[in-house]
Image (tube, rainbow, N blue to C red):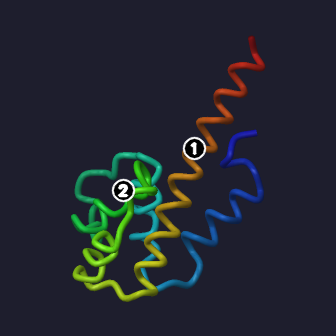
Amino acid sequence: MSASEDPWIRGLRETVLEGPGVTSTALRARIVARGAGDAVADGDHEGLTSAVSQYVDRIRDAAHTMDDQDLERLREDGYDDDGVFEVTVVAAVGAGLARLERVRALLRAEASR
């Protein structure tokens, strides 16, 4: 079963993307995609500012190196504490789901040997 077929994962994804929040559902979808390392379609960058993109990339690639300056850049971009928290959670979910899918693919490949 892929992560997209798992009911728990579908529920998590639906809650993160479509639940109430301070950011738009469209922006959250872009953040999940970027957090997963997916390319965002040309012209589909609304709300995905340089500060947000860099923040999401940092969460995806090197979360352990985050510091106050990363948070401050989002605040300078107009995000309050709720917005920073939401961007952080959405990016982490995108990165985590992508990692989960890669692990499952490796396990399926190993099992088919």
- SS state under label 2: helix
* Quarter containing the C terminus: top right
Q: Are marks 1 and 2 in contact (CB under 8 Å)?
A: no
Residue tagged 1: 99
For the point 59% across and 36% down, the residue is: 102
Residue 106 percent coordinates (x, y): 65, 27
Front residue of this view, candidates 17 and 113: 113
Q: Residues within 10 Å of mark 1 (few under 14, many from 20)?
A: some
User: Which label's residue is closer to the chain start, 1 or 2?
Assistant: 2
Q: Nearer the viewer, mark 1 or mark 2?
A: 2
Residue tagged 2: 58
Please say if 23 is above or below 113.
below
Tell me the tag on residue 18: none
Please say if 23 is above or below 63.
below
For the point 68% across and 46% down, the residue is: 3
Please say if 67 is above or below 34.
below
Residue type beneath disc 2:
Arg
